[in-house]
Image (spheres, rainbow, N blue to C red):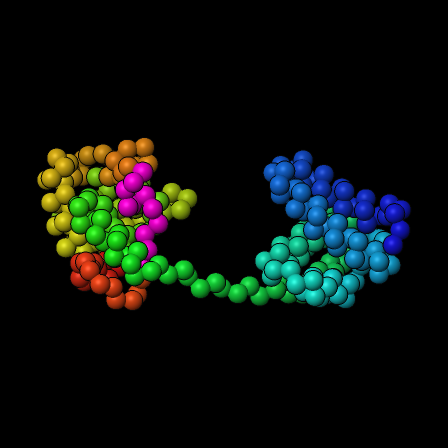
Amino acid sequence: MTDEVTPLDDAIDAYLVHLRVERNLADNTMQAYGRDLSDFCTFVIERGRTDPQDILHDDVVAWTHDLGRAQLARTSQSRMLVAVRGFFKWRLKTKQQKKDPTADVALPKLGRALPKVPKSTDVTELLVVLRTHPRDYALCALLYGAGLRISEALGLDTSDVHLDAAFVRVLGKGGKDGWSRAASRWCRRWRRTCAMTGRAGSRASSTPLCSRGAGAGDDSPVRRPLPCCGAPVAGPVWPSPLHPMR
């Protein structure tokens, strides 16, 4: 290996400048790109490739195999290959490269982690607490039965709840508008909650049901991730049936 600056080094430096100036990437992202491209650069230079034009498909494949032998996580291997792909795509787009050596190099297949399941005692404890919080009980029933995200439930206003039609209007990721069917049992519980707390629950109202700034305190169960356990548990159980809400 030589410490001499090669055309490949200069090309990578130019690409990093492009990422910084044209795409305005964050510092941490820039550092990750720099590390990944430096690793690739060191590997191919040791194979005698000092110019980007000389790098072959086999060089890229050999590098990915080397990453595998180093026992890097598949997510890390995938990220590093994506960085190198971006480098060569930029060179092709700017007409500095004739061929893309990363073409047809497959990304490592990422395994899917199994979901973490709470203990039955944790679920029982949550249900016991919810029995003394009617509003939170109704919200958690809606979370479980309608498949809402925590953020979607926290963003609900009373004007989003249509009790007569048994529908709830939710804003998903990116502010996407959507509708979720609510079971009549949940609607009845929410009516009782509104009566107990003095909320009208009318469609004209826009009072937050559980906004982050008000409504749901820090100790409220709906501010913590809601567990979902398929195993039967002792003690209080969810109202049934809830799955028809979907």
Query: The magenta stretch spans which residues?
Result: 218-228
Residue at x-position 31% and y-position 49%: 178
Residue 238 falls left or right of residue 176 = left
Q: Assign the N terminus to one quadrant of the image.
A: bottom right
Q: Which picture quadrant has residue 232?
A: bottom left
> Percent x, y for residue 157?
25, 39
Q: Which picture quadrant has residue 31?
A: top right
The answer to whether one can see residue 57 in this image is no
> Percent x, y for residue 87?
71, 50
Q: Assign the C terminus to one quadrant of the image.
A: bottom left
Residue at x-position 29% and y-position 67%: 231
Vertical placement of residue 211 versus 99, above or below:
above
Residue at x-position 80% and y-position 58%: 44
Is residue 151 part of the magenta span, yes or no? no
Vertical placement of residue 1 versus 160, above or below:
below
Residue 87 falls left or right of residue 155 = right
Q: Can you name the residue that lies furthest to the front here?
A: 121
> Percent x, y for residue 160?
24, 42
Is residue 221 part of the magenta span, yes or no? yes
The answer to whether one can see residue 122 in this image is yes
In this view, the residue in front, 102 or 213, is 213
> Percent x, y for residue 236?
19, 58
In this view, the residue in front, 122 or 161, is 122
